[in-house]
Each structure stands twice: as structure tokens, then as C-alpha cells.
Amino acid sequence: MKVGRVRDVAVLVLLAAYAGPFFWQLLTSFKPDAELLVLPPLLPSRLTLEHYRVVLEQSLIPRALVNSLGVAALTTLLALALGVLAAYALARLPVPGKGLLLLVVIAGTAFPHIATVSPLYLLMRALGLRDTWTALVLANTSFALPLIIWLLAGFIREIPEELEQAAFLDGASRLQTFRWVLLPLVAPGLASAALLTFLFSWNEFLFAYTFTATEASRTVPVALALFPGVFEVPWGDIAAASILASLPPVLIVVGLQRYLVRGLLAGALRE
Amino acid sequence: MTPRQRADRRAGLVFLAPALLTLAVLTLYPGAWVIWLSLQQRIPVFGIERFVGPSHYLFLATDPRFWNAAWVTLAFTAISVGLELVLGLALALALRGQRWGRRLALSLLLLAWALPSVVTAKLFEWLYHPGAGLVNFLLGGRPLNWLGDPALALPGLILADVWRTMPFVALLCYARLLTIPVEVYEAAQVDGAGRLASFARITLPLLRQIVLIALLFRTLDALRAFDIMFVLTGGGPAGTTETLTVYAYRSLFQTLQLGFGSAIGAAVFALVMLTAWGYLQMLRREGLAE
């Protein structure tokens, strides 16, 4: 018994070391400027909030956080609304050409963004959507949608059909059944799909870097990649900005882990 | 057909229409358009826009920069995915016996996976700092220039990518391991199988399917990877970390050759689809895919 506990702690220590690069950045974000480029010592003599003050007051990061939050939330809403309807149809309704549709959905998850980025750029420009949230929401929805449909169709198939049939017998329409019987049952699955979509949208870089031009729509990954340094690289400020950009993913991993893991496993295991 | 079936068919089409329309406009149409673009010379700043047929592809066939990028892409993919698989599997085995602190363990594990890849690039840029980086400090204070030395940049990039993606492989393997009943091992023990024999005869064969699926996902993602190399090394030094995706991006949006860049993008497209097809054939032989 005792040996087991020691082993468990050893694995935790190992994993904490694995997450070390993140903790190192966290420590860097609190280090005074004068001590940043001196190693050893590993630990600073004092901690400072100066880097966070600079990032929050003088950089474009706060605006980028708002953009990222807005784009990720809207992407999640749109992709989920479109996805759950499509998933319901594929899982339950007699749709002609279902096999082909599923194949298109799976192929859609494999499309490399670098191949579709140039046509999408021309499309967004033609529609006058450059440097808007709309462009990012549409582009992110397009790559999140296949995954969502795939995930949710699987979750819906796991739900026994008897309840819906009972509702039909009571005279409910398809839409009513969907809304009042199925949707509440698939809610945990929706939560998983929503988390993954939010996370992918929050982390997305290529589309955001290409379709945005100013702080009107630049997301956090873009603002971080373009973080300005006047004479030398502001490592402390970059560390603080990285930590701010990591907050939602960290909250999801720590606080909503159950749904995240469920979504990840369902996506991979239902091949 | 009963009225109910007719109504269901109609409902199915109505439910599907918005998602299909979105995918058609934002994924399938660009997927076809990129091929068309790759057959044109399009340089917007000079107002050039004309059909040139397959000439971009003919150029790429003898373009040393393209073949270098293809080589870097393949090396990056093979080494990254290989390392992720071995490390992920080992970690999953270590995690299997975890009785205490499982949630914390998964939090620490998945943290690296969940971060934006731009953040990962920034973390490693700082870790690799020649004078003040933790990596050189832990190596005993050697002044290695990780991202500036052509011999070290690709290994440095691969290490950052493995850090970011190995947790996904570990999670899948771990989840599969938890579904193997203890009785199987007990029975093997009764039959006189040692630990090594149990591992080789029970654990590995049962992990085979999930490992193949993890391989599929990770290989496709590694072939398409862009963010981490673009931000961490920018393809440098001297092109030693320039993948096909970075070459495509530079051609598209830095030298603004939309047609030529699209041809490289289409090459990545073909590479990913061929790889996916190959894996699916393999999974089908295993009886895994429909």
C-alpha cells in the first residue's frame, strides 16, 4: 500500500516537471526586469506585477482578449446550432445519400487550413469581411463543424430511441421531439463539443493571422505572435501576455476536465 | 411511404441544409478553388491575373526549396509522431496504476496539449534563449544557440511539438488501458506468464487499434502543422525548419504570389489526403473502419 502511494506521488512529480515550461513562463511573468537575463539563480529575489501592468495598460492584448473571447463564443454558438441539427438528421432521420455525407464530413476534418486559406482570403475580401469578427467566426465554424457533427451524431446514437417514439405517439412533431426530448438528453455531449470548439477557436492562428489587419479583430495568438519589442525582446511582458492567453485553456483543463476528456475520447474512439 | 416517413425525410433535409450549405461554401468550394488558383498566375500588387496551366507544378518539381521543405515536413512528421507514440505509451502505462491524484495528473498532462500553439512557441523560445534559457542552464551552462544553429533548430522545434501533442496520445492509450479487465492479467498469471509476457501478449495487442487511430490523427496534424514553426523559428535558420506549410504561407502572403502559393497548398492537400487514405485502408484491413 505504502509503495503504491510513493509511486503515485512520483508520477505526479514527473507530470509537474512535464508541465514545467508553463510554470517557468509563469515564474518569468513575475520576475523583475533586472533579473530576467541572469541565470542562476533560478528563483527571483522578489516578485513583481509590473509585466502584467504593462501588458494590460500599454499593449493591445486586452483588446485581443476581447476579440478572442467574442470570436470563440460566437463560433461555438454557430457551430453548435448548425452541428446539432445536422447530427440529429444523420443519426435518426432517413436522409438520402447518408454514407456519402458522412464521408464528406470525415474528409472535412482532414482538410489542411493552408490549402483553403488562399481561397477563403479571396472570399472574405470579396465579401468585404477582412478584419472583422465575422470572417473569423465563419472560418473557424467551417473547420469546427465536421468534428462537431461527428461527435454529436455519435452521442445521439447512444441515446435510446424509445423516448422519442413515445413522444411521436403522443403527437409531437420532429422538431418538438428534438427540442424537448432529445436536446436535454444530449446536453453533456453538447458541453463536450462546445468546449472543444471554444478551445480550437481560441487557439486558432493561421486564419486569424491572415484575415485580420488591426486591433479591431486581432485575436490573442496573433497579438502574441506580433508582440512588439522596441530595442530588445520584452521577455517578461511576453511571459505575462502568454499567461493571459493561456487562462481559458487552463480553466478548461482544470475545471471542466471531465467534459474535455469525454469529447476527446469520443472523437477518437468512434472511428 | 407513410406520411410519417415522408415528413421525416423532409425534416432530415431541412435539419441538414444549414450545416451542408456552410461546409459547401466554406470548405468544399475553397478546396476546389485552390486547385483552380494553383493553375493561375495571380500577383495582386501588380494586377497580374492569368491562366498558366500546370506551370507552377512543373516549376515545383525541380525547385530545390520545395524539395527541402518536403523533406523537412516528412522528417518533422516522422520523428515527432514516433517520439509522441513511444513517450505517450510509456506515460499511459505509468498512469494506469494511479490510484491517487488522477484528476491532478490529467490536468498536468493535458495542460501542454490545451495551450495555444503560439503560446507554446513563446514558451520554448524563452526556454531556448542562448544566455538566459532554462534548457542551456540545465545542460550545465553551455551557450547553445538552439534556434539559430542549423543543426539544432529542427530538433528544438520537434521537441516543442512533441511536448504539445504527446498528451493526446497518452490520453488515448490511457483510456484504452483502463478498459482492459484485471481478470485477463490474473488469468495470464495463473497460466505462468511473467510481466513481460503479459505486456507483449496482452497489453500491446489490445492497444494496437487505439495506437493506429492516434497515429492517423497525429500524422495528419503533423503534416499540416504551421503555427509552431512559423512562430518559433519562422522556417529558419537557412531553411532548416521550413516545412511545406511555411513555404506555402510565405509565397501566398509575404511575396504575394497567390497562384504559386496555392500550388504548394494544394501539394499539402494531396499529401494529407493520400496519407489519410492510406491509413484508412490499413484501418479497414484491421476491421476498424466501415
Image: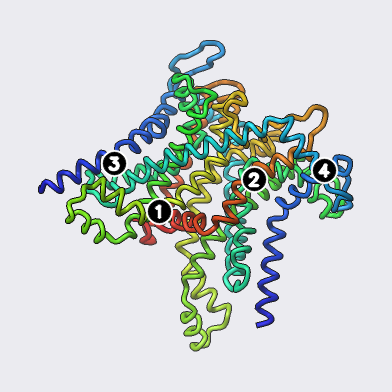
Q: Which amino acid does label 4 sit on?
A: Pro
Mark 2 is surrounded, within 10 Å at the Cα level, by few (under 14), some (14 to 19) or many (20 or more) other residues, namely: many
Q: Residue A187 carries which label?
A: 1
Task: Give the chain letter at badge 1.
Answer: A
Q: Which mark is residue B130?
A: 4
Front one among B128 and B9: B9
Residue type at numbered disc 3: Phe
Compare marks 4 and 3 and give the one earlier in the sequence. 3
Q: Residue B15 carries which label?
A: 3
From what the image shows, is residue B86 above or below residue A126?
below
Cβ atoms under marks 3 and 1 closer than 8 Å: no
Q: Residue B150, can we see it?
A: no
4 vs 3, front mark: 3
In space, the residues marked 1 and 2 are separated at their CA atoms by 26 Å
In front here: B43 or A146? Answer: A146
Whether tag 4 and tag 3 are in contact, CB under 8 A, the answer is no
Residue B152: image location, x then y, percent: 74, 45
Which callout, 1 or 4, points to the residue nearer the camera?
1
> What's the amino acid at mark 1?
Ala
Which of the 4 quarters of the picture holds residue B235?
top right
In the picture, the disc for residue A246 is 2
CA distance separating discs 4 and 3 = 56 Å
